[in-house]
Amino acid sequence: MNYGEVLHALSIDLQSFFRRSIKIDDASFPQILALAVVPDDGIEMSSLSKRLGLDSSTVTRLIIGLEKKGWAVRKKQKKDNRIIKVFLTSAGEEKQSQLEDKIDKLGSLIEKETDPFDRSELLEYLWSAHWTISKLLLKN
């Protein structure tokens, strides 16, 4: 098996694992992903689009959906009105906290299923793969 095959299989399995395991009220999976990546100090719409790998129009619809739930708000920046940042509301922060708890539980499940002698090495390899992918995303 080569890198491409492993990445493809891992991507499909992770997405399926997350979709089945992480549910928050009536949020769609893309809304859950958006909740997961919005930092405390907000994120520009264009950065959110890049982070999620979605077109800006798709992200706009996604954020409108989160606004309707009362979980997010968009704000124009004072220095440049063309820049719009997304912030989580207190209700959105609560949903994000619930999401983080669920992700931690999934991590614990993986850890329990991993041979104790392999755990630290596997975690190191996963961080290394994440770092490599992050660098590639910055290049594109």
Image: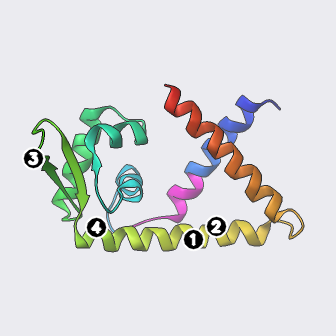
The residue that disc 4 covers is 92
Query: Which of pointers 1 and 3 lies earlier in the amino acid sequence?
Result: 3
Q: Please name whichever residue, 95 or 81, is drawn nearer the observer in this view of the structure.
A: 81
Q: Indicate whether residue 91 is drawn in magenta.
A: no
Numbered circle sitting on residue 91? none
User: Which range is magenta?
Assistant: 16-24
Amino acid carrying label 1: it is: Asp
For the residues labelled 4 and 1, the Cα–Cα distance comes to 18 Å
The residue that disc 2 covers is 107
- Mark 2: secondary structure: helix
For the residues labelled 3 and 2, the Cα–Cα distance comes to 40 Å
Query: Which of pointers 2 and 4 lies earlier in the amino acid sequence?
Result: 4
The residue that disc 1 covers is 104
- 56 over 73 or under it: above or below: above
Q: Are marks 3 and 4 in contact (CB under 8 Å)?
A: no
Q: Position of residue 117 (x, y in %)?
A: 90, 67
For the residues labelled 3 and 4, the Cα–Cα distance comes to 23 Å
The residue that disc 3 covers is 78
For the residues labelled 1 and 3, the Cα–Cα distance comes to 37 Å
Query: Which of pointers 4 and 1 lies earlier in the amino acid sequence?
Result: 4
Q: Are marks 2 and 1 in contact (CB under 8 Å)?
A: yes
Amino acid carrying label 4: it is: Gly
For the residues labelled 2 and 1, the Cα–Cα distance comes to 5 Å
